[in-house]
Amino acid sequence: MKEYENELYNKKIKLVAGVDEVGRGPLVGPVVAAAVILPQDFFDERINDSKKLTEKKREELFNLIKEKAISIAIGIVDEKVIDKINIYQATKVAMKEAINNLSVKPEHILIDAMKLDINLPSTSIIKGDAKSQSIAAASIIAKVTRDKIMYDLDKIYPEYDFKNNKGYGTKKHIIAISKHGIIKEHRKTYKPISNYI
């Protein structure tokens, strides 16, 4: 999980940021990206792709990463922008926002799958959240941050079951849409939402 980072550290590059996003598939809410710079000597074998971790484990690691990281930043792009520019472009915007929000300027960026046109050296890694500790840490920060947004939304609209589905198109969510209609946070260009409009 530190192969990519170690390669850069060996070239005297100390500040490596991992970048990942969460929320490309849901029918509701924002896409959230995170950028994380970890100390060179930091390693924790529990840090892995956020999708492979339990919620309890993610919360624990979220707190650990916040405590140990040199810098952490978030980029959030809401459903209105997603509908305007499409999810692929919105993901790029969220990732760039996260990188720009870092309090320390990174020397190199490791990005999960995406290629970004940024004025910094970067490496795009397919399935990066399973191959790079920095990207995995970013995936945990992004996932926990987005889940909190969905829990808040669940309090306003409990009938859609966002606390369990996190905005994804589960059967219960789809039934709730046909029963209660769509809310302003739904992504209007996504099916089946677009079919209801």
Image (cartoon, grey):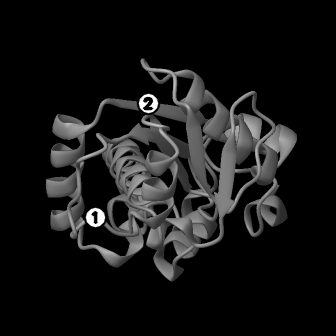
- The residue shown at (80%, 45%) is 89
Q: Is residue 30 visible?
A: no
- The residue shown at (37%, 44%) is 145
Image quadrant occupied by the C terminus: bottom right
Can you give x and y, in whole percent of width and height, for residue 195 in the image? 83, 66
- The residue shown at (54%, 32%) is 98
Q: Nearer the observer, disc 1 or disc 2? A: 1
Pick the front one: 90 or 108: 108
**In the current view of this chain or complex, which residue is farthest to the top?**
103
Q: Which residue is mark 2?
A: 73
Q: Residue 73, located in which quarter of the rendered image?
A: top left
Question: Mark 2 is on which residue type?
Answer: Ala
Q: Secondary structure at mark 2?
A: strand
Can you give x and y, in whole percent of width and height, for residue 59 in the image? 19, 55
Position above or below: 135 against 119: below
Can you give x and y, in whole percent of width and height, for residue 150 in the image? 40, 49
**Numbered circle sitting on residue 87:** none
Question: Mark 1 is on which residue type?
Answer: Ile
